[in-house]
Image: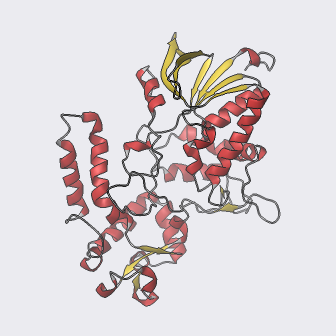
Amino acid sequence: MVSPNNRRKFEVIVVGTGLAGGSTAATLGELGYRVKCFCFQDSPRRAHSIAAQGGINAAKNYQNDGDSVYRLFYDTIKGGDFRSREANVYRLAEIANNIIDQCVAQGVPFAREYSGYLANRSFGGAQVSRTVYARGQTGQQLLLGCYQALCRQVAAGTVRMFPQTEMLDLVIVDGQAKGIITRNLRSGKMERHAADAVVLASGGYGNVFYLSTNARGSNVTATYRAYKRGALFANPSFTQIHPTCIPVSGDYQSKLTLMSESLRNDGRVWVPKRKDDRFKPPHEIPEANRDYYLERKYPSSATETLRRATFHRVQRRKFATKAAASVQEDAAFISSLPMRSKGSVKTQYASAMETSSRSMKKSPARTLTRCRCAFTRRCTTRWVVSGWITI
């Protein structure tokens, strides 16, 4: 603990101005610390956090439907295939309500009910309504609220902003991070900055996947430079990609377009029953000629079927994916897909692996990227267009 009178004696460097970095800099400035905040964009509002759409889960339990901190913790653990670190997830579930309150205090205009309570919706397969949102622009509104709080501290003089500045190296003194080396992207001038602590909030490395919804600037350069200085990675395989994307339309694409994640809970997946309908637009196929194969194979109400298929991740892989694959193998459906190569998904994946492994000796570090790139170009259309979704 640091006395409020002594906080002005300490200086903190924050690298990154997304939701994590911006809120950290604003909060530390509000507490009284002297903060230097760095970003390589021309403005903190250009951070990739602005691309988030869905919402934030918190056990507010406004609907009185039995939600609790433990239930949020359990749903999060189960949604992560039981691979998440339980202590961290439980702590996140505990402070989720406080995070929402902080965002509201910073001016984030969350959707509200007529009574004034924060509106909640079911999202991401959760069986209770606990997601706080701001239309389809949750990330944008969160970042703008964070940016407002950051600008307030910049005006107060507790935070100094360094836009268009790239971190080149991390300074280590006696095993602790005590500063960074930077380069001004406009002038090319290199500078050194010293501090009592360094916070790295520079984002992830989604570009390890060639086709994804991540920005091209998500290149993990700052984190990698810290890794070269001895920083440890925790679960580096946990890279976020979105499965609900508009299909690939050509080899020129470097990004995918995200569809609303609410489709995971509020849709019905179907394929044409007749071969003659395979080239028709979806709206021209009558209801009687649509095969809702998940509901046919596993009879239940549409909502419950999709909710079970989304919530029970392990079971979803067992029956939902197999059901989609079995329908796709049908000649009546597979011939309507714009595939450039023949064979099953397993055959195409093996071919992609073989293509990638040939470059293993030349560049082992790029094998994962090449494999994913080759597999995505060949198979993404097939897996994404597993049927049409109607709302």
- The residue furthest front is 187
Visible in this render: residue 57?
A: no
- Give the residue at the far top of this rendering: 174
For the C terminus, the image quarter is bottom right
Q: Residue at x 74, y 25 (%)?
A: 158
- Looking at the picture, the colour scheme in use is secondary structure
Question: Taking 183 as reference, is 332 left or right?
Answer: left
Residue 316 lies in quadrant:
bottom left
Regarding residue 28, the answer to whether it shows in the image is yes
Give residue 112's position: percent from left, percent from top.
Answer: 76, 60
Residue occupying image coordinates x 43% and y 90%: 288
Closest to the observer, 303 or 39:
39
- Residue 262 is situated, as x and y percent measured from the top left of the image, at 56, 64
Instruction: Establish if 266 lies above or below 363.
Output: below
Q: Nearer the viewer, residue 290 or 13?
A: 13
The vertical placement of 123 against 366, above or below, is below
